[in-house]
Image: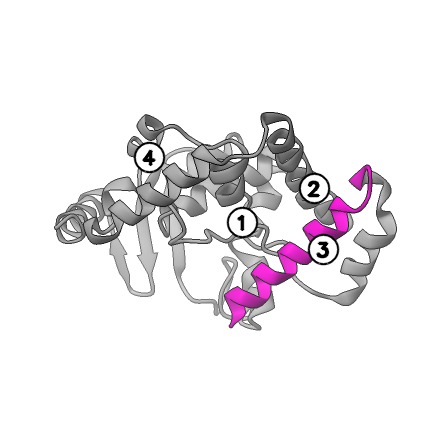
Amino acid sequence: MLRRFLHNTCILVLCLAAVSPVFTQSQTKVGAVKNSGIYVSPTNYFFVSTFGEPMTEEQIKKTAGYRYIPSVIKNERWQNWDHYNKNAPPEASRRRYVQLRKQMAYQLWRAGVPLMAGSDSPEFFVVQGFSLHDELEMFVRSGLTPFASLQTATINPAKYLGVDKQKGAIGPGKQALMLLLDKNPLEDIKNTNTINTVFMGKKWYDKAAIEKMLAEAAQILGK
């Protein structure tokens, strides 16, 4: 239900943007979203990479999450991909679509609307976890700062769910749910992929443990 609500909210905001010739002039609509108190999860990576700027077959197979898509549904995913590409809108329309979606995210952020990262998985070739990093990058491509992008996957969802006293940030009394990265994501948001260690409460998983779990998952899902 939460995912459906957030997704429908995103569609509503996009429709508001689409009826205006230039979204940057739709401050009244942006203000209405802000004043409503809702949180928005644009899931722009899915929409842009699937419909606006669709990836090639080679690009899809090189994505980090591809080998974790269960083999039993891959044929269906390729059929959907093939159907869309054979019936895709004109390139100019797709470029405008991408522009609107990026403007939507940027203007809402500038207005102070809390944004949340969402993967929209398991649509097409979007895989949970891996696609979250892609969504963070898409926020930055839309104009958000790397810090603001990180907030969409940390403190903002925690506040929405009412658990920000326990999660969403590092501090005394909060749960130890953290990632240790090799490189600074504030310098390049793609550095969220340089995971060194995962902390979950009193447990921690180093690179070797993470790689072992990923290999086991790929073997199971690939059958």
| Range of residues picked out in magenta | 1-23
Towards the viewer: 144 or 53: 53
Quick check: 210 left or right of 194? left
Q: Amino acid at mark 3?
A: Val
Q: Measure the alpha-carbon separation of dots 4 and 3.
A: 31 Å
Task: State the SS at label 2.
Answer: helix
* Foreground label between 3 and 1: 1
Name the disc covering residue 43, or none: 1
Towards the viewer: 208 or 117: 117
Q: Measure the alpha-carbon separation of dots 3 and 1.
A: 15 Å
Q: Is residue 211 visible?
A: yes
Along the polypeptide, which appears first: circle 2 or circle 4?
Answer: 4
Residue at coordinates 81% horizontally, 37% vertically from top-left? Answer: 22
Q: Amino acid at mark 2?
A: Tyr
Q: Which residue is mark 4?
A: 63
Along the polypeptide, which appears first: circle 3 or circle 2?
Answer: 2
Q: Amino acid at mark 4?
A: Thr
Along the polypeptide, which appears first: circle 3 or circle 1?
Answer: 1
Towards the viewer: 95 or 150: 95
